[in-house]
Image (cartoon, rainbow, N blue to C red):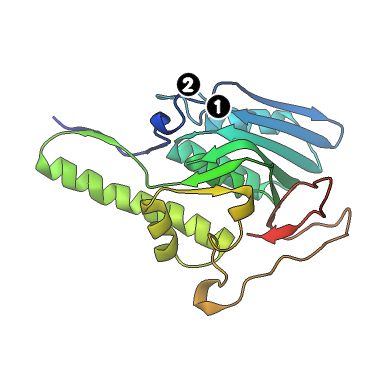
Amino acid sequence: MASCSTARNALIFAHANAAVTGGYSIKAKGSEAEIYLYGDVGDSWFGGVTAKQFADDLKAAGKVDNIHLHINSPGGDVFDGLSIYRLLVDHKAKVIVHIDGLAASIASVIALAGDRVVMQPHSQMMIHNPWALCVGDAADMREAAERLDRHSDNIASVYAERGGGDVKHWRELMQAETWFTAAEAWPPAWPARGPGGHRQHRPHQDHRTGARLRRRVVHPRQPDQQRRAQAI
């Protein structure tokens, strides 16, 4: 009797000493919705927010023009995370993601749902291969490994779609368990060329307000420097 769970993509908490504590909330006021994802994704092992709860709360927020999503999360369940990512991408509102502390594992995928992604000073992103637990014989283990590879390719395809480059490039970064600071969210960590060798959009100063911006990662304004927009 085999028991395998390959839907998990959790940050190994030994890296951060403990799970991120905090909470989750969605609050709407006027045309703005404020979402805090401070904790784990999925409730099976992690006790965090599920895609079902997120969808219900997002619907209850009503029609809004802007969504501000604040993230401090070590990750969690792959399918809950991918579903939350899709809910945000498909939403009609402009989505601004603020990485306040950590966006790791599947939380890094959720972060890429933003029309803008703002990495606060000293915040970090982390990407890695999915993890799983499997109990069974050798055939079960081989099947679980193959399934994990498919999950990894699927996640890498999101990074490629949003950041450029190809799946192979992102699989290499995932295999190495790669951490990005706010300063590293653009080259050398992120590829300079997209699929087919086409050049990606380069950072430039953008003074527009109220316009729907291209998907990008930006640094918050510092007292002694201009805000720099960085494409992702």
* Residue on which disc 1 sits: 39
**x, y percent for residue 154:** 42, 54
Disc 1 to disc 2, how far (Cα)? 9 Å
Q: Name the residue: 60% across, 31% down.
A: 54
User: SS class of the residue under badge 1?
Assistant: loop
Mark found first going from the N terminus, 1 or 2: 1
Quarter of the view holding residue 209: bottom right
**x, y percent for residue 101:** 61, 35
> Any mark on residue 12, and which?
none
- Callout 1 touching callout 2 (CB < 8 Å): yes
Observer-nearest of 18 and 96: 18
Asked if residue 78 shows in the view, the reply is yes
* Image quadrant containing the N terminus: top left
**x, y percent for residue 158:** 51, 55
Q: Name the residue: 59% across, 54% down.
A: 184
* Residue on which disc 2 sits: 47
Q: Is residue 13 above or below residue 203?
A: above
**x, y percent for residue 82:** 50, 44
Q: Is residue 84 above or below residue 20?
A: below
